[in-house]
Image (spheres, coloured by chain):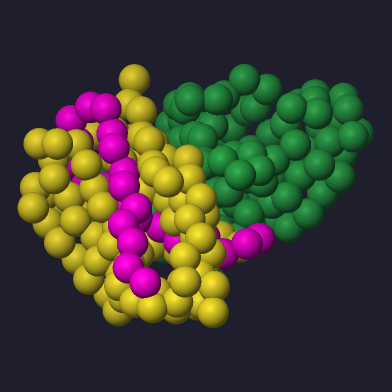
Amino acid sequence: NAGVTQTPKFRILKIGQSMTLQCTQDMNHNYMYWYRQDPGMGLKLIYYSVGAGITDKGEVPNGYNVSRSTTEDFPLRLELAAPSQTSVYFCASSYTRIESLRPQHFGDGTRLSIL
Amino acid sequence: ELKVEQNPLFLSMQEGKNYTIYCNYSTTSDRLYWYRQDPGKSLESLFVLLSNGAVKQEGRLMASLDTKARLSTLHITAAVHDLSATYFCAVDSRNAGNMLTFGGGTRLMVKP
């Protein structure tokens, strides 16, 4: 059971470039999330999804876009990379609040540097 | 807006000593999570606390929740070097998305 898989693990971008961070989970979780973690800080929610076709903004959505066409996949898109988006990005998934009391499961992260 | 504050932010302690990490949050919630993060790694779930007075223990770590005081504690007993990591508390904001708001983390270093 792979859990939450993120690709790539590392990436360096130039300012203004775009890229997509991939996230897939094989636990049939309805809920998926994208967080960013700046050095020495806690995680901040970028976007989340409660099911295929449904997404919503978190605390820090500016500069990012998401889509959820399937239950398994939740890609995060950076359209015009800026140095402020240098961070570690974590994808997570969970059951619905009613179905389960289990915590969110996190991927291993994508370390993104924008120069 | 839900705010979650942890203290201390950094803790250096000797092996064998006891200490407590505190997690305060600003609005009503009935779910609190503790995670551990090793340097350069992902987050590992430690405890899920679901009700007032809940206490969970695993090895040298014990977590508790006081929903009336909006406070959770993570107590470390007889610390060992392997406990060195960053510990995060996260509070469920109770909306439909099952969103978590994280504290800033407590970086724990246990010295031999």
Describe residue A21's horizontal placement relative to residue B74 as left or right: right
Describe residue B74's horizontal placement relative to residue A31 as left or right: left
Residue B26: in magenta span: yes
Question: Magenta segment, which residues?
Answer: B17-40
Q: Is residue B82 above or below residue A98?
A: below
Task: Determine the image quadrant of residue B3.
Answer: top left
**Colour given to chain B in the rendered image:** yellow
Q: Residue at x 8, y 53 (%)?
A: B53
Res B33 visible = yes
* Spot occupied by residue A29 in the image (x, y as percentages of width and height): 38, 54
* Spot occupied by residue A75 in the image (x, y as percentages of width and height): 62, 42
* Spot occupied by residue A68 in the image (x, y as percentages of width and height): 52, 39
Q: Residue at x 28, y 62 (%)?
A: B75
Residue A38 or residue A69, whichever sits in front = A38
Task: Determine the image quadrant of residue B97.
Answer: top left
Residue B8: in magenta span: no
Q: Residue at x 19, y 56 (%)?
A: B64
What quarter of the picture does the C terminus of chain B occupy? bottom right
Q: Is residue A100 above or below residue B25?
A: below
**Colour given to chain A in the rendered image:** green
Res A31 visible = no
* Spot occupied by residue B34 in the image (x, y as percentages of width and height): 35, 55
Residue B58 or residue B94, whichever sits in front = B58
Q: Is residue B89 above or below residue B25?
A: below
Describe residue B22's horizontal placement relative to residue B30 as left or right: right
